[in-house]
Amino acid sequence: MVWFETILVSLTLLSGLIWLLDKQFFAKHRKPELGEEVAKDPLLVDYAKAFFPILALVLGLRSFVAEPFRIPSSSMMPTLLIGDFILVNKFAYGLRLPINNKKVVEIGEPKRGDVVVFRPPQHPREDWIKRVVGLPGDTIGYHNHKVSVNGKELPYRVEGVFTGVGQGVGETGDTLLTEGMENRPHYVLERDFSAADGDWTVPEGHYFVMGDNRGNSEDSRFWGFLPESNLRGKAFMVWMNFDTSAPHWVDFSRIGTKIP
């Protein structure tokens, strides 16, 4: 969320600036009160000294190491459920500055099958999550609920009928399948109707992303390709699940689940 990053960066810079200015220009002229050996810091400076290290640590970890993200919709079911809190690896695809997301250090690139968090071109102030299906130069096809990559259809195995819980109960009755994406097999959901069939060739510097819930996902089939510059990181683990609509608000079985 851009607004949270903006507030965090602003508070970090402000507290650090107050601490620095006081140290450089004011602290040396401050005199201790009667009976005290050391002069007391003004309340504002005291707060700045206390909070700056904490804010800087949180900003550094969140911007360059790992960031928490809450799943807001059913588009990635059954892999990710509404109410899942996940961790996102922020350095997997290069180190990026907070707020403007500008890459400053090249590290790696997405692989087919990665689950990525990004800012969609049509909603640049929001964070979305989908699976990478097409890499630059790939031709992606989606026909009769099946994905093909460069003319080769991915293998599918029907696992049964899906039963949703909590906020995901609306997906009950969908067909649960395993999609064999190279070395990254994962579950997907499909419905009776087919949406947005077509073929797409991914341009350089872009990716084709889809939700695992193929019948209920606003993804590249509808709005086009994801620019590399909009990537935020790679999702890798569920660290908490909290859904007040579920029979048990916290699903402890999902804690620590790796994201395939």
Image: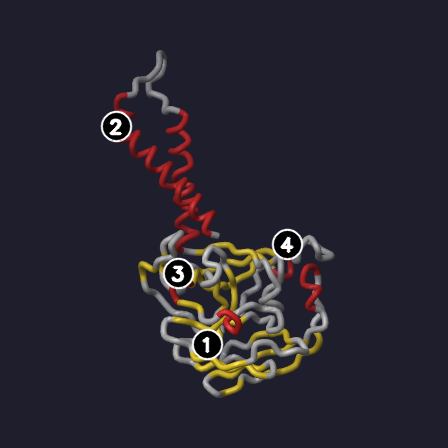
Q: In which quarter of the image is residue 72?
A: bottom right
Secondary structure found at label 2: helix
User: For the residue marked with disc 1, what is the amino acid?
Assistant: Gly
Q: Earlier along the polypeptide chain: callout 2 or callout 1?
A: 2
Marks 2 and 3 sit apart, C-alpha to C-alpha, by: 38 Å
- The crowding category of the residue bearing disc 2, from other C-alpha atoms within 10 Å (few below 14, some 14 to 19, many at least 20), is few
Mark 3 near mark 1, Cβ–Cβ under 8 Å?
A: no
- The residue indicated by pointer 3 is 91
- The residue indicated by pointer 4 is 242
Looking at the rendered image, the disc whose residue lies closer to the viewer, 3 or 1, is 1
105 sits to left or right of 230: left
**With respect to residue 188, does 150 lie above or below?**
below
Marks 2 and 1 sit apart, C-alpha to C-alpha, by: 56 Å
User: For the residue marked with disc 3, what is the amino acid?
Assistant: Phe
Front-lying residue, 109 or 216: 216
Q: Earlier along the polypeptide chain: callout 4 or callout 3?
A: 3
- The crowding category of the residue bearing disc 3, from other C-alpha atoms within 10 Å (few below 14, some 14 to 19, many at least 20), is some
- The crowding category of the residue bearing disc 4, from other C-alpha atoms within 10 Å (few below 14, some 14 to 19, many at least 20), is some
The residue lying furthest to the bottom in this view is 151
- The residue indicated by pointer 2 is 25
- The residue indicated by pointer 1 is 134
The residue lying furthest to the right in this view is 247
Q: Position of residue 172 (x, y in %)?
A: 71, 69
User: For the residue marked with disc 4, what is the amino acid?
Assistant: Phe
- The crowding category of the residue bearing disc 1, from other C-alpha atoms within 10 Å (few below 14, some 14 to 19, many at least 20), is many
User: For the residue marked with disc 2, what is the amino acid?
Assistant: Phe
